Each structure stands twice: as structure tokens, then as C-alpha cells.
Amino acid sequence: MRLAFAGTPDFARVALQHLHAAGHEIALVLTQPDRPAGRGMKLHASSVKQFALEQGLPIAQPRSLRLDGKYPDDAAAARAALLAAHAEAIVVAAYGLILPQWVLDTMGADAPCRPKLGTDPSGGSAAHAMASVGVHKLGCFNIHASILPRWRGAAPIQRAIEAGDVETGVTIMQMDAGLDTGNMLLAHTTEILASDTTGSLQERLAVLGARLMLLALEVASVNALKPIAQQAQGVTYAHKIDKMEAAIDWAQDAAQIARRVRAFNPAPGATAMLQGETLKIWRAQALAQPAPAGTPAGSVVAVSAEGIVVAALDSMLIITELQRPGAKRLSVAEFLRGFDLQPGMVFEKSSS
């Protein structure tokens, strides 16, 4: 099938790789503009762009797709590229830009279709002959990392872990003008493990989403998809992660803090102040026992090579992996070799 693809991070790259490997013709790749990153703040291409370059796929990087927005020239160029691609469908995965109505209209069933190459009944070359029937437009498909309508929005994986959900999944959705409100085409659930971080769960969901998208395209090719409207009940919104959320509030429940540490791993990383340094807390686990009576939240209760035990609102949690500014992630045993941490010290909420 001839496809356009829109995506940016690793989650999207996995889908693009699977589509390409399966033999689908990728006529256009839309991805976010290069962004500054790293200590030198040099421009870096998105994970999707890197793969597209490796495979020689055509790329467009508009700053916006809104024809009436801040970058109308970018949007107009993207529109021309999409029209010229003559794609039968567009697959979207974690693109980062909202598709405006003109994209939906371009890819809709009523949009003009490219002619399909066929056999010239007069005996001419197939390369120059055109069948009278055009290629059927299938619309815009979205690979969404939740079971809709739960966790519509930008950060479904992080919010599912943060909320303590025991399962999540992937939904293949037919896109419409709303925010993740389109009809569901396929869905598959998976367990959220107690050890899952956003990074580990995202890896599994990326592969699941790619495979589910391939199945959806296969079913769509024989017009056998059965769209299902989303339920009106149970709608939740996965708002974009704000860096300020990364600061640990030690007055919260230990279990809630531990979930947030997992949800913000690998980005933006949960943070806390200790002895004037902003540390990143990468792994922590809630403990069943309460803190000693009268222990302020954030106080270090015990220190060993196995972990740093800290008092929270209702109980305690044990930190097992953390990081000093400009240094590497370290196990507690490694961390303690260069940091004199003693019981009675107090973790404070960082300003992030």
C-alpha cells in the first residue's frame, strides 16, 4: 500500500520500520523539525527522520500544519508534498502536531485519487496505461498508546503508570477533528508490570502498535474494517508532562511517589534536592512499613548499599538508583562512594 507517515520519537520509528519492512511504499514522511539537544545544544534529527534518511524516504518537516497559523508557508509546502505523494492512507504515531481539517479532507474517502497503473487494453505498455478506477483513499490512522477512551492526549503511557493502572494497550483509531475521539478500528491490551517505567512500557507498546497497524492495513485492503465508536463513559485526558511535575513532593503517599518516579523515567526524570544538589531519582519502591513516629516527610531513615529509605506521608520508600548533576546514573552502592549521605538528612522538593 502507498502510505504517508507522520511521527517523531522512537515510538513512531518502530512503526515506520515495520511498515517499511512489510513492503508498504512510504511516499512521504512527516516529522518534527530538528531540535537542539545535549550539552552543546546542537540540532538533532528525530528518530523517525534518522530512519527515513537511512532508507532514502522523502521527508517534510513543517513547523506547523495550520494554513492560517504562524507558519503558513510550512503548512502550504506540506500540503503540496502530501498531495504529490498520492498516498492511499496516512499513518500517524506520536507526531506532535495536530492534523488540521485539510489533512483529513485530503486523505478522506471523497478526496481525489491518483489513477491506478493498469494494463492498456489497446496493447500499450502498462507503465503508460491508466485504469479508469482510482486508488481508494482510506483516511488517517492513528497508533495510540492506550485503550481509548482512557488517556486521550499527549502522554498516555506516563499517565497510565502515574495513575496506577494495571493494564493499558494500543488502539488503532480512524482520526477525526477531535483529540483522539475517532472511531476505534483495532485494540489490544497488555499488563503494566510493577517494574515498568515509561521507557520499558513504551518499547513493548511500540512493537504492539506497529504489528496492530500492519493488521489494520491488511484488513482495510479488503474493506473489512469495522469501526466502533468510543464509549462516552470513562474518558480521561493524558495532559502533556510539565517539567515542574518532576519535583518529588515528599508529603505524598510513598506508592504515589514511586509511580511518578517510574512514569518520569526516562524523561523528564523525577527530582529532589539534597544538601543543595538537585538529584534525579530513577528507581524507587514503596515499602509497607510506616516511618518512625514524628519523622518529617523527606527525611532519610536508613542508608545502605541496598538503598536509601526515605519517609513519605503514610509510609516509606527505598531509592535504589539516582544521579547527581552532570554525572551518570548510579546504583545506591556506587552513589554512596562519592556522597556522604547519613540518616537524618532531608530530601526537599526541587524547583526542577
Image (spheres, grey):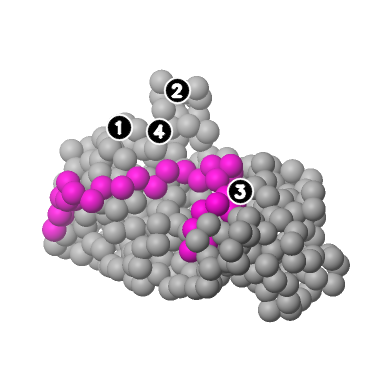
Q: Residue at x 51, y 46 (%)?
A: 241
Q: What element carries label 2?
A: loop
Question: Looking at the image, can residue 54 be seen?
Answer: no
How far separated are the C-alphas under marks 1 and 2?
A: 13 Å
Q: Nearer the viewer, residue 149 or 81?
A: 149
Instruction: Classify mark 1: helix, strand or loop.
Output: helix
**Mark toward the viewer: 2 or 3:** 3
The rendered magenta stretch, by its main secondary structure, is classed as loop
Is 334 on the left or on the right of 260, as rendered? right
Which is closer to the viewer, label 3 or label 1?
A: 3
> What residue is disc 3 on?
247
- Name the residue located 22 percent from the left edge and 54 percent from the top edge: 184
Query: Which circle's residue, 1 or 2, is located before the other in the chain?
Result: 2
Identify which residue is drawn at 28% across, 67% down: 188
Where is residue 312 shown, x and y percent of the image?
57, 59
Tell me the kind of residue under disc 4: Arg
Is 249 rendered above or below residue 107? below
Mark 2 or mark 3: name the one nearer the start of the chain. Answer: 2
- Residue 101 numbered tag: 1
Q: Which of marks 2 and 4 is nearer the N terminus?
A: 2
Query: Mark 3 belongs to which amino acid?
Result: Ala
Report the span colored magenta: 226-255
Q: Quadrant of the N terminus?
A: bottom left
Three-letter code, disc 2: Gly
Label 1 vs 4, first from the N-terminus: 4
Residue located beneath label 2 in the image: 69
